[in-house]
Image (spheres, coloured by chain):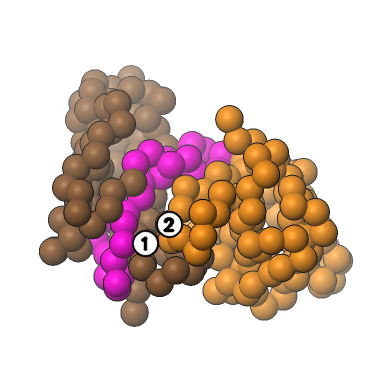
Chain colours: A brown, B orange
Amino acid sequence: KNQVEQSPQSLIILEGKNCTLQCNYTVSPFSNLRWYKQDTGRGPVSLTIMTFSENTKSNGRYTATLDADTKQSSLHITASQLSDSASYICVPGANTGGFKTIFGAGTRLFVKA
Amino acid sequence: DVKVTQSSRYLVKRTGEKVFLECVQDMDHENMFWYRQDPGLGLRLIYFSYDVKMKEKGDIPEGYSVSREKKERFSLILESASTNQTSMYLCASSFSAGMGTNEKLFFGSGTQLSVL
């Protein structure tokens, strides 16, 4: 059964600090993995996408890593800002040619001043 | 930028009412989707459409129907709203280069529906 588990469920950090969010998945056959950011009261916005052959992808202060062998991904946020407060959703894609993507439940990040 | 607009941010309806949620996208995307988002759960796909008048069931289609009469508009219909349909509803669209997977989805801001 295809599943996605994200940890922690929620996280509080001080502004300026770094943090790492985790995603474990069991999706087969695996194709790629996307991270979304969802601000409160908004729809998710795509941050990065990595294919199974990529180990890392950066988007500004966001760096995603992927280990397709262990089926793990992480999203590292550097020098956090108040605007980073949001939910971060991991979405592994299965190479089935369909549209039924599985979304993780997300990690809720709170950045405090 | 792609814009996906959902007609209402908040809706309150009574049990048994017929509810229409409207979604419009302005980038000529072929694919459109309706999801619901509940606390502690990932987004779950209700229905999607890959072309005008075409629709496919997602993972949780029961109690819902959809309509896509024009390419830019995708409507979600709750024929007889029930309290367990209280949720955040998100519309999304994507450009289709074929039957791709995990394509970048562009989401609307969501409609928080409360059924009393």
Left or right: A62 with respect to B98?
A: left
Name the chain under label 1.
A
**Which residues fall within the magenta stretch?**
A22-48
Q: Nearer the viewer, residue A34 or A23?
A: A34
Percent coordinates x, y for residue A80 in the rendering: 28, 26
Instruction: Judge if badges 2 and 1 mark residues of a common chain.
Output: no
Compared with A40, A15 (above or below) is above
Q: Amino acid at mark 1?
A: Gly
Residue in the image at 67% along x and 78% along y: B62
Residue A93 marker? 1
Kind of residue indicated by mark 2? Asn
Up-down: is A90 above or below A17?
A: below
Secondary structure category for the residue under label 1: strand
B38 shown above or below B28? below
* Contact check, label 2 and label 1, Cβ < 8 Å: yes
User: Which residue was labeled with disc 2?
Assistant: B102
**Where is residue B9 shown, x and y percent of the image?**
71, 42
Q: Position of residue B65 (x, y in %)?
A: 75, 70
